Amino acid sequence: MNFNDYDFIASEAFAEGLDEADDLNFSGRFHKIPGVIYMDGNSLGLMPKDAEDALLSAVEDYKRLGIDGWMGAKTPWFYYPESLGARMAGIVGGYDDEVAIAGSTTVNIHNMLATFYKPSGKRAKILMDELNFPSDIYAAQGHVRLHGLSEDHLVLVKSRDGSTLLEEDIISAFTEEVSVALLPAVLYRSGQLLDMERLTRKAHEKGVLIGFDCCHSAGSVPHRLHEWDVDFAVWCCYKYLNGGPGASSGLFVNRRHHGGIPGLPGWFSYNKDKQFDMSLEFEPAQNAGAWQIGTPNIFSMAPIEGSLKVFEEFGMDNVRRKSLHMTAYMMFLIDSLLAGEYGFSIATPREPERRGGHVGLAHPEEAVRINACLKKHGVVPDFRYPDIIRLAPVALYTTYHEIWKVVSAIKGIMDSKEYLLVDSKREVVA
Ligand SMILES: *Cc1c(COP(=O)(O)O)cnc(C)c1O
């Protein structure tokens, strides 16, 4: 199929035709949930069958080998953070030794800030933005406190419209007072994709180190972290990367920084050849593996190995082409079927180069209740306070017909006004 053809028609038959023409449909490689249209792959990706196999194989290794699994497992556990990192490097555009799989996103943010945030003299601030994910902000607040600095050392770039950021506003905040900037690649609510290459260049011109949180882009938008000269990056492996709930996370550290002492060292940050010498003198690994801390969580990593197999077959560039096509189709349907009268707007930028993999559908008053109704209709969307319903058609497993059904279901909910019958309290996990 030609994913560059954006001539859409709003009928169901057209949606079915798109699926028939789609020669890149991997939905059979996933455990789709019967009776459910899953639009939440940006929060927790569905399970690839290969991920299940890889996890069961790790369980088998444990049964069979006990401690010998560290060197004797099919993929030796001892080197898992590096070997999985090398396989993931292509997805984010790093060299094999610049990526490791370890820890969790928040822990990795702590490690990156502990490493790269070195307030000195006038250059003592962290730059973020007010739309950033709370956990990232809490982490940065913690580092400012640890250095005994006042809270105005965390600077948050403001949004002008409440859902997107202007690169200009970020660039003008790169001053000689900023030590390090930590920005989202894709904003978790609106799905805006920032121009990481330009931001990195501008940050460096002002002597600012820059890192990106790629939680909402990794596995959906290809990056070229090394070529752009990004200093560091972190990302979840349980969202678009389908590594399972609480899967270990990804981290990228530019080669330029290898050999430096990680901010949160542990025995797994050590030069692997000598780790078991148990010397008390710390000698960091000479690659991104130095930014892991302790024993790898093998069962939280094995599914990633299976998932990577699917990505390697599908191709990251194909993921992006198809994802853009699917989100464009979804926005076309929203424009066609939900225009005007219902009060919706699309919070996601329209330009392909400015959006990630999900569509943020905003409703000023009733987003919570419409979201709840969608669940009753067998759709799994997710809601982000205060007014955004996030819908993520995932290139690897969502079908065009499912996209059509979701937008049609929303139209049905609005026409019948059934959302008026639903409690407006939001769920604890939402
Ligand atoms: C999902 C997400 C996180 C989650 O961090 P965990 O440590 O895995 O809980 C952090 N930041 C962003 C931007 C996210 O999207």
Image: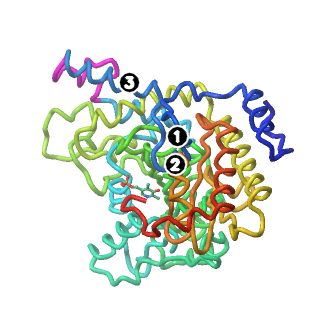
Q: What residue do we see at 47% from left, 52% from top?
A: 233
Callout 1 touching callout 2 (CB < 8 Å): yes
Q: Which amino acid is tagged 1?
A: Val
Does any portion of residue 105 appear in the rendered image? yes
Of 405 and 133, the residue lying toward us: 405
Residue position marked by numbered label 2 in the rendering? 380
In the displayed structure image, the side of residue 382 where residue 265 appears, left or right: left
Query: What x and y, as percent, mark residue 230?
Result: 54, 54
Residue position marked by numbered label 3 in the rendering? 54
Mark toward the start of the polypeptide (2 vs 3): 3
Residue position marked by numbered label 1 in the rendering? 36
Look at the magenta stretch and give its main secondary structure: helix
Other residues around mark 3 within 10 Å, as few (<14) / some (14–19) / many (≥20)? many
In the displayed structure image, the side of residue 289 where residue 419 appears, left or right: right
Mark toward the start of the polypeptide (1 vs 3): 1
Query: Which mark lies nearer to you, 1 or 3?
Result: 1
Magenta-colored span: 65-78
On whether residue 50 falls in the magenta region, the answer is no
